Each structure stands twice: as C-alpha cells, then as structure tokens.
Image (tube, rainbow, N blue to C red):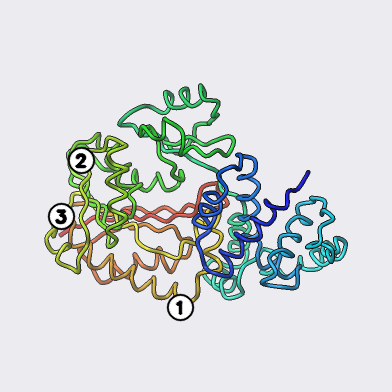
Amino acid sequence: MKLYRNLVNAVAQTTQEILSKGRYADKALEKIFKQNPQWGSRDRRFVAEGTYDIVRNYRLFAELAESQNNFWFITAVWLVVKGIEIPDWQEFKHVDVDYILQKKDSLKDNTAIYESYPDWLWQLGTKELGAEKWERESLAMNTQAAVYLRVNQLKTTRQQLKEALLKERIETVEVSDCEDALQLIKRENVFQNKLFKDGFFEVQDAGSQLISRFLEPKPGDTVIDACAGAGGKSLHLAALMKNKGRVISMDVEDWKLEELKKRARRAGAFNVETRLIEKNNTIKNLEAKADKLLLDVPCSGLGVLKRNPDAKWKLSDDSIENTKKIQQEIISTYSAMLKVNGSMVYSTCSILPSENEEQVKTFLTANKNFKLLKEKTLLPHEGFDGFYMALLTKTA
C-alpha cells in the first residue's frame, strides 16, 4: 500500500485535534475534509478510518509509542499494527517495528490497556456488569459500527428503497429484527445521495429505531418526544403514526429543534411541531396532554462507543454521576405530561444498569401511580449499538 505524506499527516493532525484539544471526532474530520476538497473517496476513507482506529485504540497506541502527544509516532504505531509498511520518511526514522509488535504482545494480559479503556471506566464497567460481561461488551464496542438506514415509510417502502439504492450501485440488506432498517453492505457517504436529500431515508442505528416502535404510537395519538435533539426518533414516530395526530418535539437546545424542522420538511413529516423547553413552564403547560411520552434521556453514551469512540476519553466518573441526577430529574418532572392510562418509554444509549434499570426502579418507588410493562436491553455484542428501553404506564 502506497502512503501519501499529506494523508498520513491529516490522520496525525486530526487525532491531535480530538485527543489533545477535545474536538468531537466527526467535527474534526468534517473540518479536515472541508480544507481538502480535492480528496477522493479513497483518500477520505483512509483518513477517517485511520483517525477512528487511533482514537478507538488510543491508550494502547500511546503505550506502544511511549508518548501520549507525539501523534506522528502514534500514527506510525497504527501503521505497524495494521501491517502497513513504514515509509522511509524523516518522521518515522526511529520507528522500530519489531519492538512495537513485541511490546504489543506483552500487554495482552493487561486488558484495560490492550483494549484501550481508562482504568476508572474499566473498573466501573466491571462493577456494574461483572468482569466477564463487561469484557465481552468492551471488545464489541471497539469494533467499527455498521451503517443502518431507516426507511421513511411516509414516502416509500423498504423493498422500494432497497431497489432504488441498488440502481445507484448501493447494496443493502434487510435487518430481520427491525422492519424499517436496511444495512449498507459497503460503507458509503449517503448524505449526498438524491434519495437522502429527497427524504426517503435517514441514517439511524437499527437499535435506535426499535425505541420508537417500543412506544407503540398509533395514528391520531398526541405523542411527546421530550428530549428530541435533532429529531431522529420524532421523525420515526411521525412515520409510524402515518402523519396523523401530533408529535410534539421538545428540547432545551433551540438549534437542535431548528435542525429538526429542516429534517421534518425533507421527510414530509407534517405532524411534527417543536417546542423549546424554558424552565418548567413548558412542562406544566403540557401536563396530562400526552397519550404517549418518549424520554430518550441524556446519558453516558457508553452503548454507542462504536460510533463515538472519543467519548471514552471525554467522560469521567463525575460526569456520569451528574448525568444520572439529570436522568432522574427528567423522568420525575417530565412524566407529568402523560395522561392517565398513557404509555411512557424511558430510554438511554447506555449499557450501565445504574443509568437504566436502577433509574426506573427509583422512579417507580417514588411514583406508585406508574407501572412497568416491559423492558429491553440491546448489547453491543449482539450487533446493534447498546440501548435500554422501558415501557411504563400511568395508572392513576
């Protein structure tokens, strides 16, 4: 494989932006791609895959490089581990391939380093899930995520979209456990595709798609998506309701709701309306108005490390504890918007029981007028991202 200095430099530069300066991985890559519009798809793929590989394995690669901030050398370690021949460049003159590979082998028994997790996170995962289960999931979260599309049933069917994509040489397979999902056989930038621009599909993990269905929305319902963000689940709810009824999408960030409005227009989701959450007045004004309520609460994001490996290096024990307080505050306060006999889903993209089952148990202990109907946990080793969802009903 022939290496080009500008592309290798881009990998080193982008990983430095992420790991030393705290920039989000997708934003750092977006920046470098905008600066280099002449790159072809192969160039962009090399830079993106290299960047994500290094971010995912940062602790191991830094250990092998014997440096946490020499990103040229860390990039060299990545090339060695990938089995790519090191070019005769000045930046790589001190790279000892045999030493790096021998040292890598010697670290196999130190799983936290070898699998590249901070010690505090490894200990937390082991405590909450048990050593065997945590190790299985931590390995799964270090793999590259598959790309899933959610078919917009307001405009097409899964079979029709599959055939339309195939005409454009984009191959997909149906996902048996998720009736709105197609999986890309080969990773591609589908955001420039006309079918995407015309609103025929969204990019959304298949596990995430299951959350909207878990709420069981019906045409004519008033459904509140109270932590809507940019609205992936709101748009899915609108499609499941066949544009009949109301989807009230709420968030504390106005810019996310503006993005949702654009996406809703593209999707043809005309029953979606947005509301900015301003203190508790917004919640009080909607008290007992929802037939269905979705609380996809802020969380650690540990279930989606396949897609966001940089989160490993941005999280802390304190940040997770603070997030858990916010989760309990949201479920306790926002649940007032649900009608009696209405249904509510509490969901996260975390695999930690303390953010999931334990939060629901705490809520139910304090709110005897709610009852748990069912719950479901998706784990990364099963193929999708990691999610938790609990369906509750308000009995009085």
Residue 32 falls left or right of residue 247: right
Name the amino acid type tagged 1: Asp
Q: Residue extending furthest left?
A: 285
Residue 135: assigned label? none
Please state which of residues 332 and 315 is positioned toward the viewer in this rendering. 315
Residue type at mark 3: give it: Lys
Q: Amino acid at mark 2?
A: Asn
Q: Residues within 10 Å of mark 2 (few under 14, many from 20)?
A: many
Question: Residue tagged by mark 1?
Answer: 318
Dot 1: what SS?
Answer: helix
Q: Quadrant of residue 79?
A: bottom right
User: Disc 1, disc 2: CB below 8 Å?
Assistant: no
Above or below 186: residue 319: below
Q: Residues within 10 Å of mark 3 (few under 14, many from 20)?
A: many
Q: Residue at x 56, y 68 (%)?
A: 313
Q: Residue at x 46, y 36 (%)?
A: 192
Which one is earlier in the sequence, the residue at label 1 or at label 3? 1
State the mark number for residue 339: 3
Q: Are marks 1 and 3 in contact (CB under 8 Å)?
A: no
Secondary structure found at label 3? strand
Residue 109, above or below 183: below
Say which element carries label 2. Answer: loop
Q: Find the distance from the CA under tag 1 to the CA under tag 2.
A: 39 Å
Image quarter of residue 185: top right
Q: Position of residue 19 (x, y in %)?
A: 58, 67
Query: Which residue is identified by label 2?
Result: 271
Which one is in front, 244 or 200?
Answer: 200
User: In this image, 66 relative to 348: left or right?
Assistant: right
